[in-house]
Image (spheres, grey):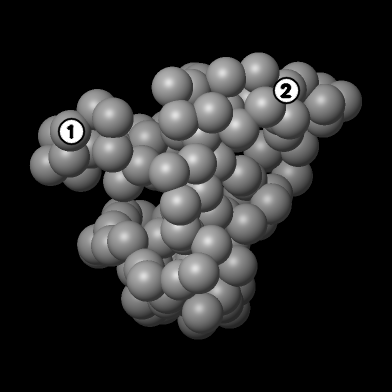
Amino acid sequence: MISSKFPEDDPRYTYACFIDAIIQKRYKDALEYCQLTWVKTTENPVNMLKQYFDGIEIRRCVYIKTTKTELNTAVVCDLKVKLEVKMGLIRPLFTKRKYKPRLIKEKGIRKPDVNGAWGVNPVSALKLI
């Protein structure tokens, strides 16, 4: 499990737990690592995760790195990740693709807070670099 490489208060830990649950198609478990505002304001968030990720087969997470960006603060963090994903239906092959998910640290709905919990914004999870 890739999450064991990071301390629990690290956004990379949160993303690793999220992607591990997604890889195993455990969407309800993945909600625990999603951005609080997204979970609480999305109608049927488990179904939305299924819609986002059922069409893509992720084999494994190759790496997770923090990126240097103006938006990285104590409550917002963009990551650079490389995932091994299955591409193609007729002659499928696995390829490595880079993504840039965003994590937000919140204590309540629309309440970013340094004392809150990191959460992956699922809408950004498959944003290609």
Q: Is residue 8 left or right of residue 95?
A: left
The front one of 113 and 23 is: 113
Q: Position of residue 47 (x, y in %)?
A: 75, 30
Which residue is painted at 53% across and 62% down in the image? 71
Q: Is residue 11 left or right of residue 75?
A: left
* Three-letter residue code for mark 2: Ile
The answer to which quarter of the image holds residue 60 is bottom left
Location of the N terminus by quadrant is top left
Residue 89 visible in the picture: yes
Mark 1 crowd level (few <14, some 14–19, many ≥20, 10 Å Cα)? few
What numbered label is drawn on residue 63? Answer: none
The front one of 24 and 67 is: 67
Which residue is painted at 82% across and 26% down in the image? 41
Q: Which residue is mark 2?
A: 109
Q: Secondary structure at mark 2?
A: loop
* Three-letter residue code for mark 1: Pro
Q: Is residue 59 left or right of residue 5?
A: right
The answer to which quarter of the image holds residue 4 is top left
Q: Which residue is mark 1?
A: 7
Q: Position of residue 18 (x, y in %)?
A: 43, 37
Measured in 3D between alpha carbons, the distance from the residue under mark 2 to the one under mark 1, in whole angstroms, is 25 Å
